[in-house]
Amino acid sequence: MKSKPKILLIDIGAPFGGVETYIVSLCALLRADCELFCICALPELRARLKPLGVQVVCIPITFNRWCKILRFLLAAPVLLYLIFRHHIQVVQVNGYLESLLMLPARLLGCRTIRTAHGPSEVDRYQWYKRPEMFLPRLASLYCLRLASRVVCVSEAVSEDVLKVVPASRVCVVANWVSSVPDQIPDRSVLNSPLKILYVGRLEEYKGLDLLFGAVRDLPAAEIIVVGQGSYRSQLEQIADGLRVTFEGFQPNTSDYYRDADIFVNPSRGPEGLPLVSLEAMAQGTPCLFSDLGVHREISQDGQGASLFKSGDMKDLRERLQLLLSDRSYRQGIVGAARRIVSAKYSSQAALQGYSKAFDLA
């Protein structure tokens, strides 16, 4: 009997976010055909991978400015041990610093896959002010050349990668949703008070402050915020006087999508392909996105979601008011969103893409 391919996934980032959700989904996708291993830093990720039959080594987390570099130093010998002990054939890395681990993996004969979840962002940081952010991104950019294959989660991300890596080693396998529900709530009549949902990291670039400013003129609106991040305390101050509920990190968000009248992703970018945007589209929640390239991509230029000019609070308010006032428009984008997700962002499409990228076929 032919043995299953052995794949090692690496993610030493924190806190739990879109990349970690992606890894759980990828393991669920591949577990029937592969023997899976993972080096991670988050106990929450380990807890989700264990039921999927993944053999997990969890690197201890330390909380300081240089903690990820320490986790990288601990991960390197673990990588070598797992390759030798279990005869790993494929090493897949996520994140900037993790990309450096492709060098020893390649030297030991492994096929290396780098999943690019977003642009390199080297220009966002100055090396003398934030070396712990700038240097890993610069190194990651050069390490892309070490990858046997670079998998981009969207066409928007591939445009950035193709500046560095030959097209023959780049492919796009879009993020996906595990299923599209057959039945969705009837949103022809809105809740009172109106329920507006945000799901994602609480960071300044995510643009949640724009949403808070846009709803101040809406008399009966409640914003439900699901997620955690370093910008939470500032957002709580900005939300003063509004009906905002901070729910924190939630492992299961399905009920939040189904209960909401509108889902808003106001991110200023950069973004790779936000899973929360796909999930909201699949769940039949009318969606309002910033007009980042990736949001135009997944909504097919506004067919499956309403788009506002990124960073423009006034335009966000106007597009939100249109969604609330025009029932037929809401229903139209919901129908289009579900068709788009079913056709392009299904687990079947992702499995085909990763089988080819990992050379499993």
Image (tube, rainbow, N blue to C red):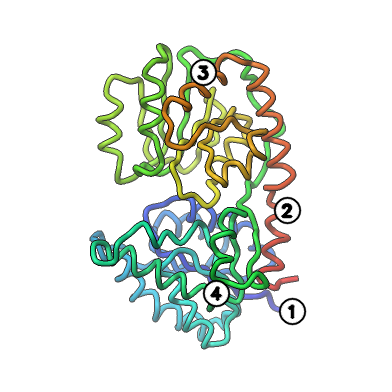
Rendering coords of residue 308 (x, y %)? 52, 31
Q: Is residue 179 left or right of residue 8?
A: right
Q: Nearer the viewer, mark 2 or mark 1?
A: 2
Residue under label 4, please give it: 91
Which of the labelled discs sits on residue 2, or is there none? Answer: 1
Name the residue at 68% across, 51% down. Answer: 347
* Type of amino acid at the residue the image marks with label 4: Val
- Circle 4 or circle 3, nearest the eye: 3
Mark 3 neighbour density, 10 Å: few (under 14) some (14–19) many (20 or more): some
Q: Amino acid at mark 2?
A: Gln
Camera-nearest label, 4 or 1:
4
At label 1, the amino acid type is Lys
Gap in angstroms between the C-alphas marked 4 and 1: 20 Å
Pick the residue in front: 300 or 83. Answer: 300
| Residue 353 sits above or below residue 347 on the image | below
Q: Secondary structure at mark 3?
A: helix
Q: Residue at x 64, y 72 (%)?
A: 169
Q: Earlier in the sequence, mark 2 or mark 1?
A: 1
* Residue 282 position within the rendered picture, expressed as x and y whole percent measured from the top left: 64, 37
Say what secondary structure mark 4 lies in. Answer: strand
Q: Earlier in the sequence, mark 2 or mark 4?
A: 4
